[in-house]
Image (cartoon, rainbow, N blue to C red):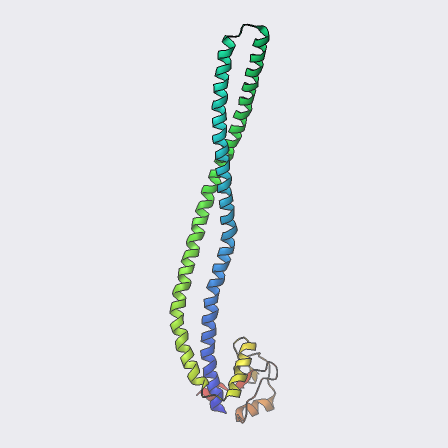
Amino acid sequence: MKEQLLKLVDLQNIDSKIFDIKVKLQKLPDQLKKLKEEFEPRFKKFNETKESLKAKEADNLRMEMETKEKEEKLKDLHQKLSNVKKAKELNAVDTEINAVKKSMTEMQTAKTKLAEEIDNLKKELQEEEQIIQEQEKNIKELEEKIETENKENAAILEGLKTERDKIAGTIPPDLLEEYEFIFEKKGGKAIVAVKGKSCTGCFMSIPPQTVNDIRKCNKIHYCPYCSRILFYPEWEN
């Protein structure tokens, strides 16, 4: 029985290494997922801002064209004004000229406001672009790191799995199944040493008779508090 328990200790050492590698490998994808979750809304907003800038620049271009058209119209009205011969006609032309001038003033005010909005959007985009480029760089570097570590650890895991299968093949199936069940339920600790009179899994004191029975090693003993398999570290020597 002692030999079987020591094999479980060896098996647990391997399983712990496998578990630690898998946990480590999962941390990086979790970090990558978090980075992408932070990046996506920012990138979406960045594109929306670009579209807004494009629309405002189109509005500005349209206003420029309308301003030129009004300038041409004003020029024509002044030309027409020089040829006016009646007071009634003079009043009509003056009214039209004033309307065009008012429209041009309003448009100039709108253009000034629009130009300010365009400048602000350009500054915002410039700042955001730097942040986005940095985030894209971080994502790419992390993706490359994940790929490298996956390749490096694949060989390590394969070696550990081979070693594990070799040891597991020498352990009775029912004991192996019980060990694997406890290992999963107890966070990677299925078999633990007795130190003094305490279980090193839950650190509770074990009854003296149970301690004596564990030393005899006539059968498998479990911690009455945490249900882990118990062994004495001296056996390893």
Q: Is residue 193 visible?
A: no
Q: Quadrant of the C terminus?
A: bottom left
Q: Nearer the viewer, residue 205 or 179?
A: 179
Q: Is residue 21 visible?
A: yes
- Lateral position of residue 154 relative to residue 194, left or right: left
At a point 48% along the width and 23% down the height, the residue shown is: 69
Q: Nearer the viewer, residue 133 or 104?
A: 104
Question: At which x and y percent is residue 24?
Answer: 46, 68
At a point 52% along the width and 81% down the height, the residue shown is: 180
Question: At which x and y percent is residue 213?
Answer: 56, 92
Q: Is residue 74 above or below residue 134?
A: above
Q: Is residue 86 above or below residue 65?
A: above
Q: State the image quarter where residue 139 is shown.
A: bottom left
At a point 45% along the width and 42% down the height, the residue shown is: 126
Q: Is residue 150 above or below residue 102?
A: below
Question: At which x and y percent is residue 93?
Answer: 56, 13
Q: Nearer the viewer, residue 83 or 98?
A: 83
Q: Nearer the viewer, residue 112 or 81?
A: 81
Q: State how many labels appear.
A: 0
Question: At which x and y percent is residue 99?
Answer: 57, 18
At a point 56% along the width and 16% down the height, the residue shown is: 96
